[in-house]
Structure formats: structure tokens, C-alpha cells
Image: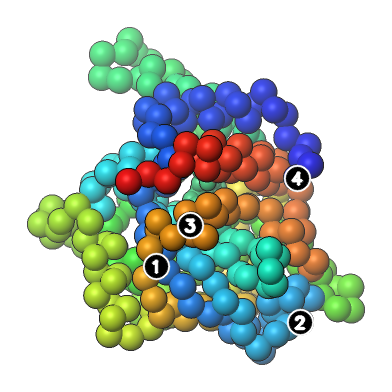
Amino acid sequence: MATDADPALIKNLLDALDTLSGTHPGFRPVHAKGVFCTGTFTPAPGAAGLTRADHARRPSTPVVVRFSAAAGLPTIPDNDLRGAGPRGIAIRFHLADHVHTDIVAHSHNGFPVHTGEEFLEFLRAVPLSGPDAPKPTPLETFFGTHPRAFQFATAPKPIPTSYARESFFAVTAFKFTNDSGATRFGRFRIAPAAGNEYLSPEDAEKKSADFLSDELGERLAHGPVVFHIRVQLAAAGDDVTDASAVWPNDREVVEFGTITLTQQADAHDPELWKIIFDPIPRVAGIDSAGDPLTEIRSAIYLMSGRRRRAAGPHS
Ligand code: HEM
């Protein structure tokens, strides 16, 4: 896949993530711990009015979904209050043999920074800012000039009672084009049909290290798990190129469709294990809005994914 992303920046970002969590061959360097499910996507009646993308126009599309904890540590406990949030969701819509489009989102509405260079500065500041670092630490200095990063780092990231009770935000905006050529900018968000529900820190402490994946398996044994996929539409003047710029809550939100998950899947299944989710949709009707993180993320997920494949499946 051709990319405009700066190769040195991509490599430096991957190195910085490795420094933060150590290398764990065969695992993702962030969102290392995850669980896969399968199901179907059904578009909302208005989805085709937004985009001419195939999955918005056909009655249903098979999906693979991976839920994850944010950290690069494969054994991070699901009830860890610091490294497990924000939680992630990655959705792959299977459009045809070897043809797919993905949504990659996390459980916080927003991102700390606008550019890959700023993200690198942020990641490099973290290990230099431990309890013994002289004040102001590099991280404090960074937060001084990047208030959104401070907001991201300090925002509560409560632990959900279930992956089926968490909301997710794709934060990157895309340009949606319908069959008539009409365009709108918008951001995907994914809401649980069962509603949000979170644990108090005291209740979280009582949970087991893998309670989120265990709970999901038990829940799916009793019935499907449903999420609503929606698109928050930009209004005139909203910045569509900056994932750290959260749009006001009163922006119109339209229904895109529903995913109905029916089965937990084995992460060691060779077809699932080799999946590299792609932050660029690569489907006609949903295009980049010009956010610099889009290309950078796509390139680093590919580089990281190829490294993971080369290491072979983990045990
Ligand atoms: C410059 C910014 C970012 C960098 C450098 C970055 C880096 C990465 C990397 C290296 C991976 C592992 C890819 C793989 O090995 O397959 C990853 C996965 C992931 N990232 Fe990011 N990321 C960035 C921004 C974001 C944003 C804005 C979100 C949320 C919308 C996000 C959510 C996720 C999720 C959910 C996964 C796990 C995907 C999966 O299950 O395979 N990331 N990220």
C-alpha cells in the first residue's frame, strides 16, 4: 500500500511504543490484549444517503470485531485502572474475498494531539517523567503547551462492566460521499444497545484479570451483543483534520447501522490472527478528511502488523 507518511516518523513512533511497554513478539505494541467476535452489520435506512460505500447499501455484511485494552502489555489485567483504558474496538466489514473496510475506535472522545510529530514528543516524554525526574518533567512541559493532551491523560477512563456496555469513538473524521455526489464530513461512534455501565473503583478491584473477555463469552452464549454505529456530522467551521478537536455535543448524529455479534472467536484462528486493521477505510464513498494522523496510523499499523506476522502466533 502506497503511503505519504514519513518512514522515519513511523519507525520512531514504533520504537517509542516499544520503549514504553517493552517488546512482546507476536503481540500488538499497543492494544496488545484483545478478544475477537464475529457477527453481521445491518445498515440503517439512511446510511446510503450518507455514503455509497457497499456496506451501507447491501442488506447485511459479515463483520469481525476485536475489543482490546489500550496498553502494549499482553497480560494487562482488564481491571487495571491506569493502562487498560481507553479500551479499543476494531471492526472489519467483509465486502468480498480480500476486500474489506475497517473502523478503529477507542472509548474516549478525542485524542491527545493533532500530528504524528506531537504524538512522538508525547510518547518520548513519558518514560523520562517518572517519580524521580527533575521538575518540571518533560511530560509536564509537554502538557503546558498541549492542554488537550493533559485533558486526555487525566480524563476518567472508568472500567465498563462489559465490553457490551462501553461506547467507542473513531475520533478521525472522514469525508462521506453518496451516490449523487453529495458530501458530508463526519466521525463514527459506536454505542452499546444495552447502554453504558461502569464499575466503581472498589468493584473494579474485585474483578478478575480477564473478566471482560470471560464476561463477553458468557454473554454471547445467552444471546447476541448489539452496537449502534452512528456518524456525528461536522457543522461549518468544525475542524475535520484534527482528532484532538472534539466537536460540540449538539452536532447532528445520524444512524449508520447496527452490528450484531453472535460468537466469540478464537484469536489463534489463522485468519483472525493475521488481521491488520487499517485506519484508512479504503472503500469508495468514505475518504480521508485530511487528518495527518490518518496516513501515519495506517502506515504504522501495517509496519507493526507485518512485524507481528513475521514473529508468528503467540502462545
Ligand atoms: C499517531 C497516532 C497513533 C499511533 C502511532 C497508533 C499506533 C498504533 C499501533 C502501532 C497499533 C498496533 C497495530 C497492529 O500491530 O496491528 C495500534 C492499534 C490500535 N490503535 Fe492506534 N495509534 C494511534 C492513534 C489511534 C487513535 C486515534 C485511536 C482511536 C481512535 C487508536 C486506536 C487503536 C486501536 C483500537 C488499536 C487496536 C486495533 C486492533 O485491535 O488491532 N489509535 N495503534
Mark 3 element type: helix
Residue placed under numbered mark 4 in the picture? 1
Q: Residue at x 24, y 65 (%)?
A: 214
Residue placed under numbered mark 2 in the picture? 49
Kind of residue at badge 1: Ala
70 or 187, nearer to the observer: 70
- Determine whether, in the image, residue 300 is placed left or right of residue 34: right
Q: Residue at x 48, y 77 (%)?
A: 39
Kind of residue at badge 3: Pro
Q: Quadrant of the N terminus?
A: top right
Q: CA distance from mark 3 to mark 1?
A: 11 Å
Residue 198, horizontal then vertical, whole percent: 26, 65
Kind of residue at badge 2: Gly
Residue 20 in view: no
First in residue order: circle 4 vs circle 1:
4
Residue placed under numbered mark 1 in the picture? 265
Residue 20, horizontal then vertical, whole percent: 39, 28
Judged from this view, the residue extending furthest toward the top is 134
76 or 168, nearer to the observer: 76
Q: Which mark is residue 270?
A: 3
| 76 relative to 100, above or below | above
| 173 relative to 72, above or below | below
Q: CA distance from mark 3 to mark 4?
A: 22 Å
Q: CA distance from mark 2 to mark 3?
A: 37 Å
Does the Cβ of the disc 1 residue fall within 8 Å of ligand 1?
no
- Camera-nearest label, 3 or 4: 3
